[in-house]
Image (cartoon, rainbow, N blue to C red):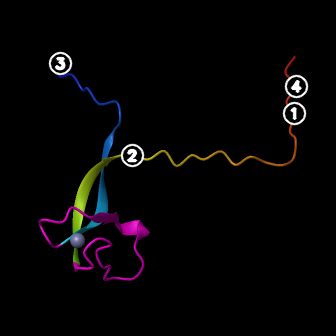
Amino acid sequence: MGNVDANAKLAPVKVWRCKNTECKAWIRDELTTGTDPTCPLCKGPMIRSIKHLPELINKIKRQKKEKVSEETV
Ligand SMILES: [Zn+2]
């Protein structure tokens, strides 16, 4: 039985990473605008890549302003 230490599931995520190997900047593809993002650190060109990142839990509970009271008997 293989033990998995990390509880977080890793999912492949499309990212852009800096072409400069000495620069560790990268951005999620979904966070970029346009097709040719520039590195936020060194302003250099970026290339498409894949990173395995812990899955983000996007379930943000929207708090409704309406008060919904559920009465359970
Ligand atoms: Zn860079």
Q: Earlier in the sequence, mark 2 or mark 3?
A: 3
User: Which mark identifies residue 1?
Assistant: 3
For the residues labelled 1 and 4, the Cα–Cα distance comes to 6 Å
Residue 11, image x, y percentages: 31, 48
Residue 25, image x, y percentages: 26, 64
Element at label 1: loop
For the residues labelled 1 and 2, the Cα–Cα distance comes to 32 Å
**Label 4: few (<14), some or many (≥20) within 10 Å?**
few
Element at label 4: loop
Ligand 1 picture quarter: bottom left
Residue beneath disc 4? 71
Amino acid type of the residue tagged 3 in the rendering: Met
User: Which mark identifies residue 3?
Assistant: none
Looking at the rendered image, the disc whose residue lies closer to the viewer, 2 or 3, is 2
- Is residue 20 shown above or below 67? below
Q: Earlier in the sequence, mark 3 or mark 4?
A: 3
Tell me which segment is drawn in magenta.
19-45
User: Which mark identifies residue 55?
Assistant: 2
Element at label 2: loop
For the residues labelled 4 and 2, the Cα–Cα distance comes to 35 Å
Circles 2 and 3 in contact, beta carbons < 8 Å = no
Amino acid type of the residue tagged 1 in the rendering: Ser
Amino acid type of the residue tagged 4 in the rendering: Glu
Residue beneath disc 1? 69
For the residues labelled 2 and 3, the Cα–Cα distance comes to 24 Å
Circles 1 and 4 in contact, beta carbons < 8 Å = yes
Element at label 3: loop
Which image quarter holds the C terminus? top right
